[in-house]
Amino acid sequence: MGEPFDLIIQGGTVVLPERVAKLDIGIRHGKIAEISESLVGTVSEVLDATDKLVMAGLIDMHVHLNEPGFGHWEGFETGSAALAAGGCTFYADMPLNGNPATVSTDALKLKAELASGKSAVDYTFWGGLVPDNLDALKPLAEAGVFAFKAFMSEPGGEGEERLRRADDWTLYQGMKRIAAFGGILALHAESDSITARLAEAAVAEGRMTAADFAASRPIVAETEAVNRALYFARETGCALHFVHISSSQAVDLIDAAKAEGLDVTLETCPHYLVLTETDMGRIGPAAKCAPPLRSGDAQEALWEQLSNGRIDMITSDHSPCPESLKNKTGQTFMEAWGGISGAQNTMELMIGEGHVRKGIPLTELSAMLSSSPATRFGFGDMKGRIALGFDADLVIIDPSNRYVLNREHLYQKHKHNPYLGREMLCRVVRTISRGVTVYSMEEGLKHSGAGQWAPKTTKRRDPL
């Protein structure tokens, strides 16, 4: 008789890297110990997953939880709760509105202290590339930052120690430094010179609607910045990752660079795939983000790129703020805070819209949601797939449970969301982190604070 299992997940439709099959999963000491058509043996707990999907937990590599902050932003406790409720088992906190931003080892230490004992699921940290922190990049990597982020347009925010835009000299020099120690730089790619001038003109002329905001950040601002960053990558040899790509044209540029042999990947986000600029006008500032939502035709072109395998991963870009910053009395759309709060919705949106509506295979969606981000960023030996020896990070989804999202469902600190009132075509019913249930639909959040800072364990694979 073998060693007892701690948990068996029985009878589920399991999404493996290469196939989907009805299987049992045996978990022992937080790891996947056995996968079989029918598991037998001593076990502490059995979960019946009949008629449910069992997938690798979502790995969300683009989340802004904004600690340390000013008390009114999202934090690790509420942000990670929303992620867990949405099927996420591992996330990467990216600097934005936290003060100080993670651009020094002291700031990283402070952030790690604030996260310890607060996160529902495992996590890791991005560092920031800003003017004047070039000498801090390698020490940050040695201290545990797994990769770096830079803005090519102004990120906004408050506080003297907020994240700042990286000018071209900073980008070029930063890429040289990061390439020297084998790191990766992620980029918010919008041309600040284009977007700033267009926004100034719109405001001066009193053009302040959602459509005016979209027009002030056109696709050419994204493609120009992508082109410039790719040129710097050719000169420096730096590995790049482009965040929240919103246009098919930008995907084409990045795909061509891959064909050249550049070490580059990209992500998009659910909001670009399920919402349009028309929705932005209908919903209001809750749907304001940068880059902005695009036209219906642009959205369909992005879906085609995804279906053709040209998008490496999908992230939420959870960028929360107090509701007062979205709906201030007398505030125009142009003046409202930008950023979409979508931490809890990525998995349900992508399975519902991508698989149920568009027929994209679950194996392909699982790769974009879980295994590709894990592999790209150095966690592919322990997370991101259902395989023997991997962390038992799993999400159980009921594909027959349709529901309308409302505020009471949300675990994030601020209960605004562009998807409120939307019918979700499936539902996350359980999230399991290292073999332990951290969320269930019936009981809500469980074992809050059990998440751990996960070390990078593998060198990235080039290319994905």
Image: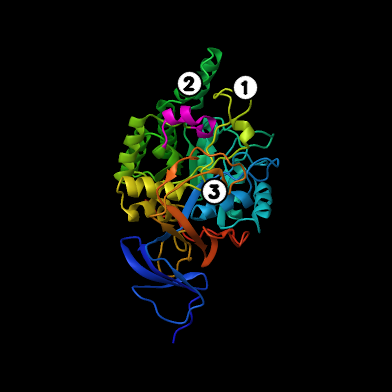
The residue tagged 3 is 409
Please report the residue visible at 45 percent of the width from the left and 41 percent of the height from the top.
422
Secondary element under disc 2, as helix, strand or loop, is helix
Please report the residue visible at 40 percent of the width from the left and 28 percent of the height from the top.
219
The residue tagged 1 is 330
The residue tagged 2 is 212
Residue 85 percent across, percent down from the top left: 53, 54
Q: Work out which quarter of the rendered image holds the N terminus and state it.
A: bottom left
Residue 186 percent across, percent down from the top left: 49, 42
Q: Is residue 185 above or below residue 394?
A: above
| Image depth: mark 3 or mark 1 in front | 3
Kind of residue at badge 1: Gly
Q: Please indicate whether residue 23 sits to the left or right of residue 97 in the image.
A: left
For the residues labelled 3 and 1, the Cα–Cα distance comes to: 29 Å
Q: Main secondary structure of the magenta part?
A: helix
Residue 327 percent across, percent down from the top left: 60, 30
Point out the stretch of residues depicted in magenta: 275-290
Secondary element under disc 3, as helix, strand or loop, is helix
For the residues labelled 1 and 2, the Cα–Cα distance comes to: 17 Å
